[in-house]
Image (tube, coloured by chain):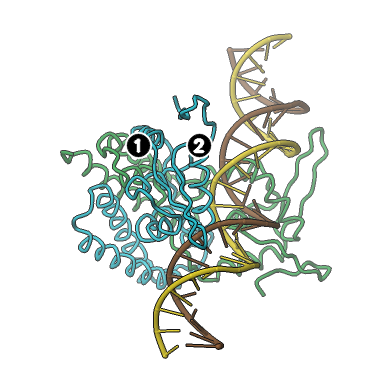
Chain colours: A cyan, B green, C brown, D yellow
Amino acid sequence: MECCAGQDGKLCEMRLTPTSYIVLGLARWSPGVTAYELERTINATVSHMWTIQRSQIYREPARLAEAGLLTAETEGDGRTRTRFTITPDGERSLDAWLAEGVQDMPQLRDLAILKVFFGAGPQALARTRLLAHQARLKEYELLREVGGLAQSGPRLALEAAIAHERTSIRYWSDLAKSSS
Amino acid sequence: MECCAGQDGKLCEMRLTPTSYIVLGLARWSPGVTAYELERTINATVSHMWTIQRSQIYREPARLAEAGLLTAETEGDGRTRTRFTITPDGERSLDAWLAEGVQDMPQLRDLAILKVFFGAGPQALARTRLLAHQARLKEYELLREVGGLAQSGPRLALEAAIAHERTSIRYWSDLAKSSS
DNA sequence: GGGTACATGTAATCAGTTACATGATTTA
DNA sequence: TAAATCATGTAACTGATTACATGTACCC
C-alpha cells in the first residue's frame, strides 16, 4: 500500500523522496511542464523551504516517468525537450503522501547558529544575518501581497516562512545589540 | 588559504563539511573522545539543529585524522576502540571556519509545511505537530535550566531553538483552531 | 558578427542513509 | 546463564552537489 502499481500490474519499487513529491505536486498544477520550468517555479516558490539542485530537477521527472507516475513526451524541434504530465497513478501517490502523517521533526540547520554554538563571536554573524533575514522577509511580504489570489496551501506555507523570518530577525537583532 | 597543510608539508585536499566541523568542535571540547561518545554528545546537544548518522560519526573522525586535523590512538584491549584528539592544524582549521562569514541561508525543511503547501488538510497535521513541538520546547527549557552553567555558545544556540519552537507552536495552534 | 543571457541537459564525485554484524557488560 | 543493553564498528546503496557542455535567441 505504500507503493503504486503500474498499469501493467508490476509494482514500482522506487522510493519517493520529498524531491519526488515536490516534482509531482508542481506537475499536477502545471500539466505538460518541462524540467526547466520546474526549476524556475521551484526557485520562485518552495526554494525557501526546500532547495533542489539542477541535476536533480532533470533526473527526478525521468525517474518518476519510468515509474509511471508521470508521462514524458519529447518534443523534437531541434534540441529535444521533454514535457511531463502527471498520471492517475501519480495523483494517487501524491494524495496518499499528503494524507499521511509526518513523523520527522524539522531541524534548524542554520550554519550561523551552528557557529555560535561552537563559540563564534555572535556580533559579526548577527549583523550580516540580520540584514539577510530582513531582505527575505521583505520578499515574502511582497509575495503575499502580489500573490493574493493564490491557493491557500502556498499562502499558509508562506505564513510559516514569514513567522520564522520574524523570529530570526528578533534573535539576531538581540544578539547584535548585546555586548559580547 | 582555504585549506590546511599537513606537518609534512603536503596539502590536504579534503573538503570539510558542517559534519566535519561538528566533529572538530566537539573533539576540541573533549580531547580523547571516541566515536561513540561523539554520538551521545551529538544526540544530546546539536541534534535538534543538525542530525548526523551513525556511520558518518565513525567515518568522519577517521577522515579528519587522515588529513592531520585529529590524532587517532587505538586502544587494543580486546575490541579496538579509537580515541581522537584535535591537533593544532585542526584547531586552526576550526577557528578559521568560525571566523568566516556565512552566506548560505537556512531552509525551513519542514515536511509538514511542505505538505500544507501542496494542499494537505492543515488541521490533522496541526494537531500532531503542535504536540510534538510543545514536547520539544519543554525539553529545551529543561535543558536551559539544568545546563545553566554551560558555555555561552550552546546557551545562545539553545535560545534560537526555543524561539523557533515557540514560533512553530503559535503557527500550528492557529492552524488547528482555524476552520478549514 | 560577437557577446551575453536563456534554455537544456550529462557526468563524475561525494555525502548521507539504511541495514547489517558483533564484542562487552550489566541485570534478572 | 540467558537476555538485554551498551559499545563499536562496516558495507552497500542512493540521493545530492559540483562541474562541465552546448544549443538558441536576443541585443549591441
Q: Residue placed farthest to the front in the image?
A: A77
The quadrant of the rendering that contains the C terminus of chain B is: top left
Which picture quadrant has residue A148?
A: bottom left
Work out whether residue B112 or residue A20 is closer to the camera in this orientation and state it.
Answer: A20
User: In which quadrant of the rendered image does the N terminus of chain B lie?
Assistant: bottom right
Q: Residue at x 34, y 41 (%)?
A: B133
**Label number found at residue B37:** none
| Residue A131 seen in the current view | yes
Expressed as whole percent of the image width and height from the top left, the position of residue A91 reads 36, 36
Q: Is residue B28 visible?
A: no
Q: Earlier in the sequence, mark 2 or mark 1?
A: 2
Residue at numbered disc 1: A98
Q: Residue at x 68, y 48 (%)?
A: B33
Which chain's residue wears label 2?
Answer: A
Q: To which residue does mark 2 refer?
A: A67
Which residue is painted at 28% across and 68% down in the image?
Answer: A138
Front label number (2 vs 1): 2
